[in-house]
Image: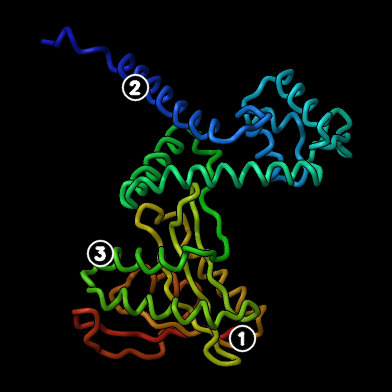
Amino acid sequence: MLNPSRKPTLRRHVEAVRRFNRFYSTQIGVLRESYSSPYSLTEVRVLYELAHRQVASAKDAGRELGLDAGYLSRILGKFQRKRLISRSGSQSDGRQQMVSLTAKGRTVFAEMNSKTSAEIGTLLRKTPVAERELLVQAMGTVESVLQPSESQEQFVLRSHRPGDMGWVVYRHGVLYSQEYGWDERFEALVAEIVGKFIPNFDPKRERCWIAERQGEIVGSVFLVKKTKTVAKLRLLYVEPKARGLGIGVRLVDECIRFAREAGYKKITLWTQSNLYAARHIYRKAGFRRVASKPQKLFGFNLVSETWELAL
């Protein structure tokens, strides 16, 4: 028999979402009140959209933000009066109005963006790192559920920046312990590799790629100089929840492309025989195993392999 006090599922879910909205709106309000701003949250969101494009059509911006055309027009009018934007007709369609931030507009946005990041940082610093990770993952889940899958960006690659090296070491240590049982000596090896990469980094001959999905790091790889003609691929990894998206293949492809452009004649790499997914990617990219050696590493008897690719 149904419990008469139990609310219908949809009703409970609606109330839960509204309760979260009230809570989150309060949190955002606290952030906004910490410094004065002449712009509403919606206006700041429009500025953000324009700041991340060279030029945008007013129609497309309104559609992506879900704003009424009249409301957006009033916001853009305010921006134009303050000389934050410039407007012009589209060269391909005279009915379209193109919008871009002026130098003043980019300065205003940069200042607001910096203040907002600082305020959120202050809020998050009160929360332990492990709980922050849960928070970010939960936000990603909300976004992935509510956003239509066809419009989701699968992943993006970027160069490294402060904080990434520590993350790479941490995630390698955790993942390889969970999946293969490797001890902390593997984490120490990863720390040694990235510790040498940063002080000796040569941007013309070396590169680190960080893969992100919905703002979260989900993979990485390094290409470093071994000799004048030989590059070394190192520390390829992909988060379990992001596997199957082609991230590993893309990271290796970027290494190969960059190595050719940098003038290397060969890429070499060191791996273990039980890393089947990585070995499959290497073989598919054209690498060939040239040597193998049984070794006691990271608490296990492993077979280390050297693979090479002629460019």
Front residue of 106/36: it is 36
> Which residue appears at 38% of the width and 76% of the height?
191
> Which residue appears at 32% of the width and 72% of the height?
275
Quadrant containing the N terminus in the rendered view: top left
Quadrant containing the C terminus in the rendered view: bottom right
Quick one: SS at disc 1? loop
For discs 3 and 2, the disc positioned in front in the rendered view: 2
Residue that label 3 marks: 179
**Quick one: label 2 or label 1, which is nearer the N terminus?**
2
Residue 238 image offset from top left, x and y in percent: 40, 62
Identify the image quadrant of residue 165: bottom left
Q: Can residue 96 be seen in this view?
A: no
As drawn, the label of residue 264 is 1
Q: Callout 1, which amino acid?
A: Tyr
Quick one: SS at disc 3? helix
Q: Can residue 280 be seen in this view?
A: yes
For discs 2 and 1, the disc positioned in front in the rendered view: 2
**Residue furthest out toward the left:** 1
Name the colour scheme: rainbow
Residue that label 2 marks: 16
